[in-house]
Amino acid sequence: MALNAYLARQPIVDGRHQLVAYELLFRDAPHAAAARIEDAAAAGIDVISNTLCNMGTDWLLKGKLAFINMDSRLLMSDFSALLPPDKVVLEVLETVEVTPEVIDRLKSFKQAGFRIALDDYVHTPERADLLPLADYVKLDVLAHPADGIITTVKAARKHGVKLLAEKVEKREQFEQYKKLGFEYFQGYYFARPENVSAKVVNPTQAAVIQLMEKVRQEADVRQVEEGFKRDVALTFKLLRYINSAAFGLTCEIQSIRHAVSILGYRPLNKWLTLLLATASPSPMAPVLSRTAVTRGRLCELLGAYHLSKSEQDDLFITGVFSMLDALLETPMQQVLERITIPENVADALLSRSGLYGPILALAEACESGEAGRIESLAESLFLSPEQVNEAHLKALAWVEQLGLE
């Protein structure tokens, strides 16, 4: 059924112990105290995927910044460009070789609005080329005693770079580095990394690959929309991603077609590539997924008799998302904390109330074959038995055409 996504986040505080950011760290188990990293780039992709696609920046960061480690491969990849510039600090690892390509890449990130941190910085002629592009310099207080970092501090100050002391384990270290002019601090003295997890449902590789092909060919947006409708996880992740605070949109994106139009094909293809890295090779909970897609289509068709096209789009989302609590093995109230949806949709999902609630209830009654309940709900919605039956048959036929397992 549902899978688990894991991350650790370690607080970064200012001189008054006020939380300002988290460093996000790779974890492969719920109670792991440290990361077992065999491939730094793969670990980084996992952190980005969990941040953007599985947990969401709003829920994970609570308005704070995220420091995310970047090795050379991840820094140069398209995945890093998917991160929201106003929420993420790209932390360049000390293993990254300073090359003209790296300098150009960091310049492009700066132009896009990202902030740059230099991890475990040691001031050398080679790494000095990075300072003009940096917003933060992180120094390991265990590796570099305070009396031996004056050169680094002076160099950072020359470029207006903020200083962050990491691996601070004692109050004496905190006070000592604070006197040296360090603005930010991280380490066990303040807090150990906190493991966080979330139930996730991933799209299938086949669904992502088929959709990527449509996007690559710049197919009509209606065809791309159909691709999303094949997979519950794709729909859920797309709407959460586009409605996250990272996009700064002034209105909620309520339909798949609108989300695709806003995002654009090139960024959409990058996002799908990230999803492909974590997609399931075989369908998860195929029966539940099929039921969710069928229910979404049925709600959409039932709404077509009396409601507008935009409301029909809402109804598809309502029907599909009504199975998320089962797919994620998580109470619906907690599911809704991870995504922004219209109030009418939320009311329907939580209590079968509001504008869409009775239609969702009717769709569920059709699935269970409750004749008396179908008749009663249909009558309250001014729908005839023939209209309900026609919509149900059309929904079943549409799902058959999708070729879902």
Image (cartoon, rainbow, N blue to C red):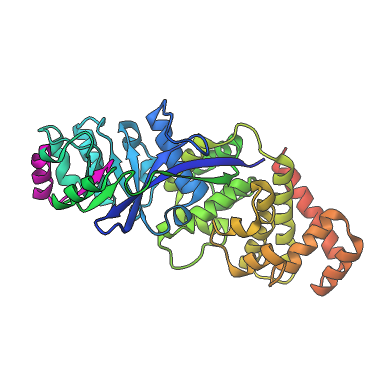
Q: Is residue 340 visible?
A: yes
Q: In percent of the image, x 88 and y 67: which residue is there? A: 375
* Residue 28 sits inside the magenta stretch: no
Q: Quadrant of residue 347?
A: bottom right
Q: Position of residue 134 (x, y in %)?
A: 20, 46
Which image quadrant for residue 286? top right
Is 154 one of the magenta-colored residues? yes
Percent x, y for residue 342? 58, 67
Q: Position of residue 145 (x, y in %)?
A: 16, 37
Quadrant showing the N terminus: top right
* Callout count: 0
- Up-down relation of residue 363 to residue 208 (above or below): below
Q: Quadrant of the C terminus?
A: top right
As drawn, is 271 to the left or to the right of 189?
A: right
Instruction: Identify the magenta region.
Output: 148-168
363 on left or right of 121: right
Residue 28 lies left or right of residue 12; in this view the side is: right
Q: Seen from this angle, which residue lies furthest right?
A: 372
Observer-nearest of 300 and 341 = 341
Q: As drawn, which residue projects farthest toward the top? A: 38
Whether residue 217 is visible? no
x and y percentages locating residue 209 in the rendered image: 55, 36
- 79 or 166: nearer the viewer: 166
Residue at (56%, 56%) from the top-left corner?
256
